[in-house]
Image (spheres, rainbow, N blue to C red):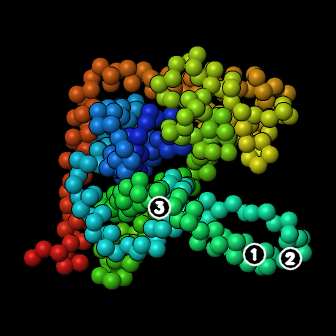
Amino acid sequence: MKKRVFSGVQPSGDLHIGNYLGAIVNWVRSQEEHDNVFCIVDLHAITVPQDPKILKHRTLENAKMYLAAGIDPKKSTLFVQSDRPEHSELAWILNCFTYFGEMKRMTQFKDKTGIQLGRNFTLPDTSDRLISNYDNKQLIAIIREIEAEWKNSDTWRIQNKRKEESISVGLFDYPVLMAADILLYDTDEVPVGDDQKQHVEITRDIAQRINNKFGKVFTVPEPVIKKEGARIMSLTDPTKKMAKSDQNENSYVLLRDDADTIYKKFAKAQTDSENVIKFNKEKKPGISNLLNIMSVATETKIPELEKKYANSNYGQFKADVAECVIEMLKPIQAKLAKYDKDEDYVRKVLKDGAEAVAPRAQETLKRVKKAVGLGL
């Protein structure tokens, strides 16, 4: 029996090669061996302000890109999250079995909002304290003391209060909705980047908590993290993940970018002054990112690429990476042009997908409601 896999991506911006190489390409390759459920998670998108027309456009655009990238509706299920109300209903039930303390520890919420203990903390002048005279335990105690003083100050409270008043409850709570997405389909595996692993872990915690209380209600999913291509980094700041939200358009390559644009973006990619093409994420994050992109795009091992470019300069290497990406995107862009002319087909795929997953979603929700005592 095939393992069931659930994956979802927000329609919060145009898809880039980080989305493709880090996730979609693996989805396509797994269609023969897995029972794949792919979801455009538009409910997650509205945890931050959205223009309704743009959100609808991006939802359809993302569907086009999944299909163009190779998601086959005959082998996999593709649908829009909000077309299945079971996601929201299950999320509410899961909320009642999720602890506030767990949610407060979610690192992505802290990173996105800046609301976290010590986030605004700046170590004051310690010239009167000779740091070298203290061991680690003493230093930790000193820092905690100073931090506590800062967090008790009016400045800290005012800053955090302002932030809290502008953040939606949905943004704080969206890991529970993600848990509902996953658990609704008796998911066995969830392919994620390492930055999303924590969300699968809290999904597992919630599922196990309910199972321990009511018996076998949920399948407990496993996170699957693929090392190569799992995290494509920004071209302008290779210490950060490539992101659709980045204000610098040179930091990412969109799936619709033309050849000239792609060449220019890779030409501006951050590297270093050594002019040595060697993989070392700590000392050479820019070159390592380019090697990773070429490796996944061409299905070539990084050591082979290092050997091939041992005597090449950065300029030539960047141009070759750009060429690989351009060739990789050509068939995708050709299919996108086709779907641009036949959007009704794309809408039908999404509608059929939502209908196809309905029995699974409804059965799971029925089982959960019976277990916790809802309804008569």
Indicate the quadrant containing the N terminus: top left, top right, bottom left or bottom right.
bottom left
Which residue bears the numbered disc 2?
Answer: 134
Other residues around mark 2 within 10 Å, as few (<14) / some (14–19) / many (≥20): few
- From the viewer's perspective, is the residue at label 3 or at label 1 nearer? 3
Q: Position of residue 159 (x, y in %)?
A: 53, 58
Extreme-top residue of the structure: 260
Nearer-the-camera pick, 340 or 219: 340
Discs 2, 1 touching: Cβ within 8 Å: yes
**Callout 3 secondary element:** helix
Please say if 247 is above or below 340. Answer: below
Residue 142: which disc? Answer: 1
**Callout 2 secondary element:** loop
Please say if 77 is above or below 139. Answer: above
Q: Position of residue 28 (x, y in %)?
A: 44, 41
Q: Residue at x 85, y 27 (%)?
A: 311
Q: Residue at x 57, y 63 (%)?
A: 156
Other residues around mark 1 within 10 Å, as few (<14) / some (14–19) / many (≥20): some
Is residue 232 in sight in this rendering? no
